[in-house]
Amino acid sequence: MEKENVYYATGKRKSAIARTWLKPGNGEIIVNSRPVDDYFKIESVKAILLQPLVLTNTLGSFDIKTRVAGGGFSGQAGAIRHGITRALISANPDLRPILKKAGFVRRDSRVKERKKYGQKGARARFQFSKR
């Protein structure tokens, strides 16, 4: 593996962290040593991680290898999307304005709010009874 043509980036979303490697190739995507179609069964989730490639017209020009841990399918797909975006920017800085306008450059910082003590959930309360 040639070091000068491999671009690495880390993507995060919710509690998922994706380590992503991009190298020029024919568009093969590997997630946790499995093809993307085997790893993500839901089409909408696959579409999320392909968004930066579709937007920049680089869908068939890079081979992508990803190691992702934590979270569920949606969070993992978002983390991979973030990692692909950052790696694309390191490969070609001219793509940054396009990806920034689409909102893929900034990490989506929304995470689950913690449950508070004496309550049913983060915001939900136990029903109040006056009598």
Image (tube, grey):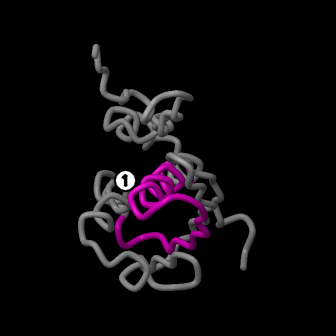
- Residue farthest along the top direction in this orientation: 130
Measured from the top left, where is residue 19 in percent x and y? 63, 61
Q: Nearer the viewer, residue 42 or 98?
A: 42
Would you say residue 75 sits in the magenta stretch?
yes
Measured from the top left, where is residue 126 in percent x and y? 36, 29
- Which quarter shows the N terminus? bottom right
The residue that appears at 73% across and 74% down in the rendered structure is 2
Q: Nearer the viewer, residue 47 or 5?
A: 47
- Residue to which mark 1 is pinned: 52
How crowded is the residue under tag 1: few (<14 C-alpha within 10 Å), some, or many (20+)? many
Above or below 126: residue 37: below
Question: Disc count in the image?
Answer: 1
- Residue farthest along the front direction in this orientation: 131
Above or below 79: residue 131: above
The residue that appears at 56% across and 29% down in the rendered structure is 117
The residue that appears at 51% across and 85% down in the rendered structure is 34
As helix, strand or loop, the secondary structure at mark 1 comes to helix
Q: Nearer the viewer, residue 57 or 33?
A: 33
- Residue farthest along the left direction in this orientation: 44
- Which quarter shows the C terminus? top left
Q: Nearer the viewer, residue 2 or 54?
A: 54
Residue 7's image quarter? bottom right
The residue that appears at 51% across and 34% down in the rendered structure is 115
Residue 45's image quarter? bottom left
Q: Amino acid at mark 1?
A: Pro
| Span highlighted in magenta in the image | 59-87
Measured from the top left, where is residue 80 in percent x and y? 49, 59
Residue 26's image quarter? bottom left
Would you say residue 99 sits in the magenta stretch?
no
